[in-house]
Image (cartoon, rainbow, N blue to C red):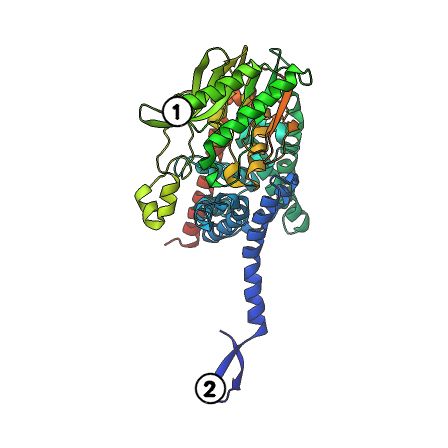
Amino acid sequence: MTVTATSVDESDQVQPQIAPASRAARLVRLVPALAAALSGVLLYVSFPPRTLWWLALPAFAVFGWVLRGRSWKAGLGLGYLFGLGFLLPLLVWTGVEVGPGPWLALVAIEAVFVALVGAGTAAVSKLPGWPVWAAALWIAGEAARARAPFNGFPWGKIAFGQADGIFLPLAAVGGTPVLSFAVVLCGFGLYEAVRLMLERRRTRAVQRSAAAVALLSVAVPVVGAVAARPLVSDTAEDGTATVAVIQGNVPRAGLDFNAQRRAVLDYHARETERLAAEVKAGKVEKPDFLLWPENSSDIDPFANADARAVIGKAAKAIGVPISVGGVVERDGKLLNEQILWDPAKGPVDTYDKRQIQPFGEYLPLRSLVGAINENWTSMVRQDFSRGSEPGVFTMDGAKVGLVTCYEAAFDWTVRSEVTDGAQMISVPSNNATFDRSEMTYQQLAMSRVRAVEHSRTVTVPVTSGVSAIIMPDGTITQRTGMFVADSLVQKVPLRSTETPATRLGILPEIALVLVAAGGLGWAIGAGVRTRRAADPA
């Protein structure tokens, strides 16, 4: 501590006074930490429901400025602050009904992955072409978050904030990893280009080489996105289907909507019968099939004759097949199931949700969680079981792939339906437990990205909204409000062409993870050689 003067209090004790210069130095040291956290907040603001996708670029530009040239330990801390700034507001919806504990715990864990990316980025920032290595490291972090812990939590992938952006066509090239990579690369490249314009100390040859890398980091993603636009098409390759999306609404928001299971079923049956009356009156074109949301019948229609009668009556009224979201118990297993309901035959096919939600549909570490808070264990009294097979229903000749709610965040679940023959995709969801939070809009943006990624129409039937119909180019053509009963009817294209992203599957992600590993290995090796040169002994 620097002492410049002393003062004597009433007890004649000498008190040290901190020099203004020392205080200013401390404030300067806080600038990178503050910038890291604020750039994370800026990244959050780029996500839906806002359409400010382009803010992701300056967010990563500032993040690059904060990390460049620092030690890996500093990068670890700064990365954690960036992760907190991003994920705290992004995931606040996870605590809407259960309080701040689970929300803060989730963010604290997920931000660790961002911290590790920060450490790696600081290490590779000294390498030539560092924006490429750093962007690949971000994708490695996203890949890890999508798989661990508890089978992963991909929410917050950069790709999911780009549904309105110019980079969106890249989803058709290499899926969410390539789309995320392009955005992050462009952001880091933007900072590097600005830095080089302000720096004059390099030799002309080195300056030109570094400037070329910086400019390419910005230009290549933009040019690639423009070049990928022909992959985005709404052409009806296999004809069309007239689909109806049913949103029956719920009696009230929150976790206790489950206590009104019969009311929720009745609401969806009532909206279906209302649509049937409009079709009969000639006000609406008759659909080829109906899509109900997840949890539209939490009363097991296989075990409950009353629920079976309600669904059967609605199906006969409209006279076409319905995909019903049910909770069923079979062979002692609790399943989140989509049921294909024929108006004449009743249930004829099922799809069991494969990627179930930890702490929502099953409870990992149940004894530990119960010791912390017994109320949390009571919310998930019985764990759901996982399905094992893709779900593609043949509905009036159209092949409809089912991706239930949370599954839309995972690359593999959506791709498996398309490779199994789906000509369109439905994402039945239930967001009633999250009230009017941004969760609904974040999930809707995922479905828009999936539409472009696999060049398929995507429908999103939701119990309480927002339900929507999305074209293969990611455009929303119809949508409902929240917490209203409504239906959407539209003729949509059926497609069978597989995009490069569909065909390549996980390969682009593996390639980018290998690039990240190569850059990190180079940086570690260079650091070891530098230390040996400095200390020959």
* Residue sitting nearer the eye, 354 or 252: 252
Relative to residue 261, is residue 307 depicted above or below? above
Q: Residues within 10 Å of mark 1 (few under 14, many from 20)?
A: some
Locate the C terminus and report the quarter of the image it occupies.
bottom left
Where residue 421 appears, x then y in whole percent? 50, 14
Q: Position of residue 412 (x, y in %)?
A: 46, 26
**Looking at the rendered structure, which numbered label has been put on residue 13?**
2
State the SS at label 2.
loop
Which residue sits at x=38%, y=38%?
380
- For image coordinates 54% across by 10% down, the residue present is 397
Q: Residues within 10 Å of mark 2 (few under 14, many from 20)?
A: few
Quadrant of the rendered image containing residue 192: top right
Residue 264, given in percent of the width and then of the height, sits at 50, 31
Q: CA distance from mark 2 to mark 1?
A: 73 Å
Residue 341 position within the rendered picture, expressed as x and y whole percent measured from the top left: 48, 16
Confirm whether residue 62 shows in the render: yes
Amino acid type at mark 1: Gly
The disc at residue 387 is: 1
Indicate the amino acid at tag 2.
Gln
Q: Quadrant of residue 464?
A: top right
Foreground residue among 122 and 80 = 80
Viewer-nearest residue: 507 or 114: 114
Element on which disc 1 rests:
loop
Front label number (2 vs 1) = 1
